[in-house]
Amino acid sequence: MQKIHFKAPGCWINDPNGFIWYKGEYHLFYQCFPYSAQWGRMHWGHAVSRDLVHWEEKGIALFPSKTDDRSGCFSGSAVEYDNKMYIFYTGVNYTEENPENINTCLNDNFISAQLMITSEDGMKFDNISDKKTVIPPIEDKNTGDKTHTRDPKVWRGKNAWYMVLGSTDNKNGRLLFYRSEDLCSWEYVSFTEKDNFGWMWECPDYFEADGTGITVFSPMGFTDDGKEYDSNAVCVFSSFDEEKGEMKLYDTYQYLDLGLDLYAPQSTTDKDGNRVIIAWARMPESVKSENGEWCGLMSIPRIAEVKNGHIYFRPHTNIKNAFTKKISSPEKSGYMLKTVLENGESINIGGYLIKRDNDKIITDRSAVFNVKGNYRLTAETPVINDGYDLEIYVDENIIEVFINNGEYVISNVVYGLTDRISGKAYDLYAAE
Ligand code: FRU
């Protein structure tokens, strides 16, 4: 059982969606195929939490009901306006269904529209009566692609609402920007793109942290070392001119996480106004448990902060505060480990090796990742100039290594961790 991380409630999950603090609770929706542990016709699952540590499952919130979302409710976001929750997402309509699995399509033959659904309390969603479509499939090729345009992220600017969508010109990924006065009618304003930065940009998100603009997205076909995965989440330094509705993307970027397992992150502001971000941890194999087969996990919610031109991703304060009970031996899962490594030193956590070599932190999951396919087994930080404090969150199927309180993070999915820890001395903590 994963204790720290939100996991699929016995089926398939992928991207976090509609992440929001609303009426005294955090709502986390997620891409979900509720019938089996594989990707298929997407629904939105729903969970709530008061503290980002303990989650309560609420079941399915969004399901296909209109022609525009008949083949799936893809990713999107939520905002609060006039006490109501407004959810924006991509509706998908397969124009060539796979006859052997109608939950998937053939030859990428589908069209995408942008849809909206509202709720008075964030709990009840009327999939039938709500009109849903707000932006029909794109017809103009110069703007975007009618198939690959998706994942609306909406935010409130100074004088209007803005929406960013991920899209492509079929060679380069791009972002499309829309503006609205009332959240219901949307006007296209501009696009921005970048050469040689992946062919399609999924799940865009824009926010400012400590006065710096950051655009997060997941370019497809970006990391070409021949390994799984070639699509990875990046955070690009940027600025958004609201008057012109134009985004400028600078050349500087960071990976969201150096483990390259996390994908499609989404951010929101927490109860105290911090920028909190959560991502899907991709699992190449499902897990069979007493309660059924499941596949897909969420990362720990992290607070994003910018200092000296670098983005830090720290475990959310509520998570840190939860893990304060000192324990003497590891629990089967769901514990936190603290240690500091000198050059040449290492620690082995249940088969997952972490070492410091030439002032880099290097991880190796070879012994706990017996999975078919050409996956990355090792990850490393750049040379770190100062401090090697490790705060490591260990769950049954994921380990997250926070280095120097989020200066770098390496997260990896694992299978078959043992409860043996060896190497460098450490302190262990369980949740209160
Ligand atoms: C990213 C993604 C999104 C899409 C969703 C479908 O993982 O491909 O672009 O909306 O997943 O499940």
Image: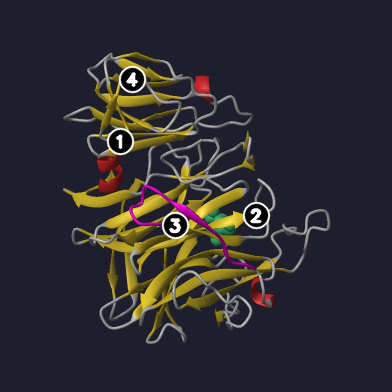
- Which residue in the protein does label 2 denote? 34
Secondary structure under tag 3 reads loop
The local crowd at label 4, few if under 14, some if 14 to 19, many if 20 or more residues have their Cα within 10 Å, is many
| Disc 2/disc 3 C-alpha distance (Å) | 38 Å
Q: Quadrant of the C terminus?
A: top left
Residue drawn at x 34%, y 77% is 245
Q: Nearer the viewer, mark 2 or mark 1?
A: 2
The local crowd at label 1, few if under 14, some if 14 to 19, many if 20 or more residues have their Cα within 10 Å, is many
The local crowd at label 3, few if under 14, some if 14 to 19, many if 20 or more residues have their Cα within 10 Å, is few
Secondary structure under tag 1 reads strand
Residue drawn at x 63%, y 40% is 291
Q: Position of residue 400 (x, y in %)?
A: 38, 35
Vertical comparison of 226 with 116: above or below? above
Q: Position of residue 345 (x, y in %)?
A: 28, 14
The local crowd at label 2, few if under 14, some if 14 to 19, many if 20 or more residues have their Cα within 10 Å, is many
Q: Work out whether mark 3 precedes mark 4 in sequence or the reverse, and give the earlier one.
A: 3
Q: Which mark is residue 402?
A: 1
Q: What's drawn in magenta, residue-wise?
A: 48-63
- Which residue in the protein does label 3 denote? 195
Ligand 1 shows up in the quarter that is bottom right
| Disc 2/disc 1 C-alpha distance (Å) | 32 Å
Q: Work out whether mark 3 precedes mark 1 in sequence or the reverse, and give the earlier one.
A: 3
Q: Nearer the viewer, residue 268 or 362?
A: 268
Q: Nearer the viewer, mark 2 or mark 4?
A: 2
Can residue 28 be spotted in the picture? Answer: yes
- Which residue in the protein does label 4 denote? 355
Say if disc 3 is inside 8 Å of ligand 1: no
Q: Position of residue 181 (x, y in %)?
A: 37, 87
| Disc 4/disc 1 C-alpha distance (Å) | 13 Å
Q: Are marks 4 and 1 in contact (CB under 8 Å)?
A: no
Q: Residue furthest front?
A: 432
